[in-house]
Amino acid sequence: MSEKADGPARVRLVGLWASIVAVIAVSVTVVADNHRAGFGRVVPREEQMVLLLIAVLLFVIQVIAYLISRTRRPSTPAAARTRSAAPSAENRS
């Protein structure tokens, strides 16, 4: 598989890892009960839970997109070739 064709799969994989990191970061903030957002702003518990819900939702979407992309691309060059309907009908040159 060429690198150009493999680019979207790599982008999806990076997005999947970024979603994992986001879910972990927001989860740690919620568990630690840290309401400080920096710059003097305070984030209420309700907003933290909404952010966690959004992060989990995006993670699930990333997983689904990644799994769909993996099932659509062939894993080996031999799998990319299509076979004829009849097993006995082979191209002989």
Image: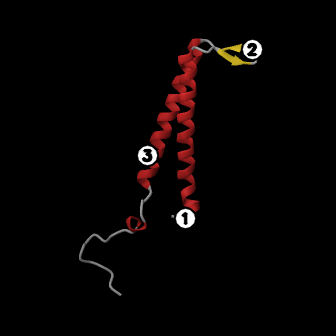
Location of residue 23 in the rendering, given as x and y in whole percent from the top left corner: 53, 29
Q: Which residue is mark 2?
A: 40
Q: Which residue is mark 1?
A: 2
89 lies left or right of 69: left
Crowding near the residue tagged with mark 2, few <14, some 14–19, many ≥20 C-alpha atoms within 10 Å: few
| Disc sitting over residue 38 in the figure | none
Location of residue 25 in the rendering, given as x and y in whole percent from the top left corner: 58, 27
- Which residue sits furthest bottom? 93
Q: Residue at point 61% right, 15% down?
A: 34
Q: Which residue is mark 3?
A: 67
Q: Residue at point 32% right, 85% down?
A: 92
Location of residue 26 in the rendering, given as x and y in whole percent from the top left corner: 57, 24
Kind of residue at badge 3: Leu
Q: Comparing marks 1 and 2, which lies closer to the viewer?
A: 2
Q: Quadrant of residue 73?
A: bottom left
**Dot 1: what SS?**
loop
**Mark found first going from the N terminus, 3 or 2:** 2
Q: Residue at point 54% right, 40% down?
A: 17
